[in-house]
Amino acid sequence: MISRRHFTILSATALAVAALPARASMPIRVLASPGCGCCHAWADLARARGYAVTIEELTEPEAQKSERGIPLELASCHTIEADEYVFEGHVPFEALETVLQDRPDITGLAVPGMPMGSPGMGDDPSARYDVIAFGGEAGTGMVYYRAGTAQPFDT
């Protein structure tokens, strides 16, 4: 028999999953640095949003990032592949989902380094850091999203 508490939790979970965007069930491949916990923390957040996440370890990080068109000065601990785009590091989901929806002519987005408060690094919505678009119309890099601001897409 299900308790009232379990029923409430199951109901809330079902509503949350039903509210996810249709694209959320798409596969995301995370190439993680060996032994890096924050890579897995980002992947866990993606799973919680409904994405189908697989994780593999980076074996030759510089080469694997270069092969995907990621400028090495924008490198971070993990690389994400989703729907023909590349996302480097602790990219916020609002920025990632906007790219997947709007389909801009870029290779992808990067959050260089590992800023505290970014997804997987403490998840603080007020943390301020820039998300850089690269490749295609963005060239070697331009600010796409300013995390922790009232108007993050006004760059």
Image (cartoon, rainbow, N blue to C red):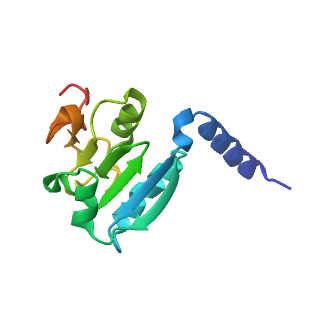
Along the viewing direction, whichever of 123 and 114 lies nearer the viewer: 114
Q: Residue at x 28, y 62 (%)?
A: 64
Residue 106 is drawn in which quadrant? Answer: top left
Residue 30 is drawn in which quadrant? Answer: bottom left
Q: Residue at x 18, y 34 (%)?
A: 138
Where residue 122 appears, as percent x and y from the top left, is 33, 55
Tell me if 4 is positioned left or right of 149 in this view: right
Q: Is residue 93 above or below residue 48?
A: above
Q: Name the outermost residue toward the bottom.
A: 35
Along the viewing direction, whichever of 5 and 69 lies nearer the viewer: 69
Quarter of the image with the C terminus is: top left
Where residue 83 appears, as percent x and y from the top left, is 44, 42
Along the viewing direction, whichever of 105 and 56 lies nearer the viewer: 105
**Image mark count:** 0
Q: Name the outermost residue toward the right.
A: 1
Quarter of the image with the N terminus is: bottom right
Q: Residue at x 32, y 60 (%)?
A: 78
Q: Is residue 46 above or below residue 39?
A: above
Where residue 15 appears, as percent x and y from the top left, is 65, 37
Along the viewing direction, whichever of 43 and 80 lies nearer the viewer: 80
Residue 41 appears anywhere in the view: yes
Tell me if 89 is positioned left or right of 3 in this view: left
Q: Name the outermost residue toward the front.
A: 67
Where residue 124 appears, as percent x and y from the top left, is 32, 47
Residue 20 appears anywhere in the view: no
